[in-house]
Amino acid sequence: MTQNSLSISADFDSGNISLLDASDPQHIKLAIRPDTKSAHFQWFHFKVDGMQVGQPHGFSLTNASESSYNRAWTGYNAAASYDQKTWFRVPSTFDGKALNFNLTPTEPQIWFAYFEPYSRERHDWLIKRALNVPGVECLATGKSVEGRDIPLLRIGDGAAGKRNIWIIAQQHPGEHMAEWFMEGVIERLQQHDVELAGLLEHADLYLVPHMNPDGSFHGHLRTNAQGKDLNRAWQDCTPELSPEVFFVRDQMEKYGVDMFLDVHGDEQIPYVFTAACEGNPGYTPKQEALEADFRKRLSGITKDFQTRYGYPRSTPGNANMNLACNSVGERFKCLALTLEMPFKDNDDAPDVKTGWSGERSKQLAKDVLTTLAQMVSVLR
C-alpha cells in the first residue's frame, strides 16, 4: 500500500491495517480489518516506510468507533517501535469516531501496534528455550485449524500425588501480553531458584504458551481461523471448528487439573486483575477460599496486581459455562482463574514511556509462580 513516498504495509505476521488515504502525511487515514469469518476487530499492527525524518506525521484509525470495544480507546496510547525490539507509547486521542496519534519520526521507518507484538518466530524460539531447561518436555502437540503446532509443555515427571498446575495463554490472539507472560514463566524456570524448586517438588506445570496461532498470524483480535472465540468454546468445541480447545481439553482429561490459570488481556480496564468461577452451579467453599488466598498473596507480592477493579461477579448458577475458567473449574472442582492484564497501562503503577508492556507481563508471571509456590500444598 503506497501513496507518494510513503509505504504502509501489514503483510506480515500479526499485521492488520488497510490504507485509505496517505496523500497528506500529517493525516494518514487507515482502517482496521475484521477477523476472518467474524465481525470482531481492534488489533492493529503495521509498518510505515519512507517517512521524512523530523517532519510531523499523523495517523487516524477511522473505524475505531466501530471496533469490538470502542469505549476502550479512551485513555489508550498506541505502541510504536523503530526496530521491533524497543517499544514505546505514542500519545493518542479518541474523538468519538477515530483513534488519532501523531509522531515526528527520528527514523524513516516505524512499526505501530495495539500492543507490543509477540511474533511466531519468537514463539518458536521460546519453545526451544524451554526444552533446553532440565525437566521440561513437549508432552504433546496439537494442531490449529490451519495446521500450526500447539505444543503442550510439562515441567515435572508426572509422579503420582503431585499437583497438576495448568497455565494457558492467548486464546484471544490479539492479547499478545499473554505470551510475554509465558516467556516470564520460562525465564523463571531457567533460574530454578529455591522457591521454584519447592513448587516443582510438589507440582508439575503444564504450559500451553499459545492457544491461537492462526488468529495471531492473521492479525485477529478474538477468533481463530474459523471465526471461533476459543474462550467461548469449552463446552461445545469440535475438531473442525475449535481444534485448539479440543486438544487441550483432551489432555486435561488425561492428566488432571489441580489449578488452572487462563492468561488474557483486557482492552478497557487499566489494571491487572483476576476473574473466577463464582457463578458455577457446583462452586465450592474451597474454591472460594483458594481464590481469595491467591489474590491476597499476589497483591502482597506485587503492586501490579489489585482486587478493587475487575469484572462484575457472576450471580450463583448463572456463569457462562463455555468460558475456559468456568468449564475447567466446574469439571475439576479446582482453583480456576482468568488473569487479565491491560492493553493500556496499570493505573496503580503507570509508566508513561511504555504503558503496560512485555517486560511487565514477564515479571507478573514470575510473581504468580511465587504465589503458586506458597499455595501448592493446599491446592488439593
Image (spheres, rainbow, N blue to C red):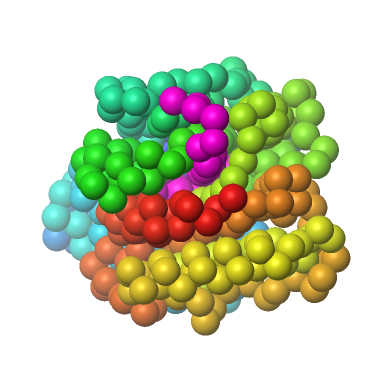
At x 54%, y 19%, the residue is 140
Residue 271, compared with residue 129, is above or below; it is below
Tell me where residue 237 sits by quadrant.
top right
Coordinates of residue 271 in the picture (x, y in percent)? 45, 72
Q: Answer with left or right where residue 3 lies relative to residue 353.
A: right
Q: Which residues are magenta?
A: 157-181
- Residue 198, image x, y percentages: 33, 46
Q: Which residue occupies 24% across, 40% down?
A: 192
In the image: residue 192, left or right of residue 156: left
Q: Nearer the viewer, residue 146 or 47?
A: 146
Provide residue 232's location: percent of width, then percent of height.
73, 47
Quarter of the picture containing the N terminus is: top left
Q: Is residue 361 visible?
A: no
Asked whether the viewer can see residue 304, the reply is: yes
The structure residue drawn at horizontal position 36% and vertical position 74%, both measured from the top left corner, is 300
Left or right of 134? Residue 229 is right
Q: Is residue 172 magenta?
A: yes
The answer to whether 364 is drawn above or below residue 17 in the figure is: below
Who's the residue at 28% across and 27% down the image? Answer: 133
Q: Which residue, as the protein is rendered here, is positioned at the far front?
A: 161
347 and 137: which one is in front?
137
Task: Depth check: give the residue in front, 59 or 257.
Answer: 257
The picture quadrant where one finds residue 225 is top right
Please state the total of marks drawn on the protein image.
Answer: 0
Q: Is residue 376 magenta?
A: no
Query: Residue 324 location in percent, x, y?
Result: 68, 48
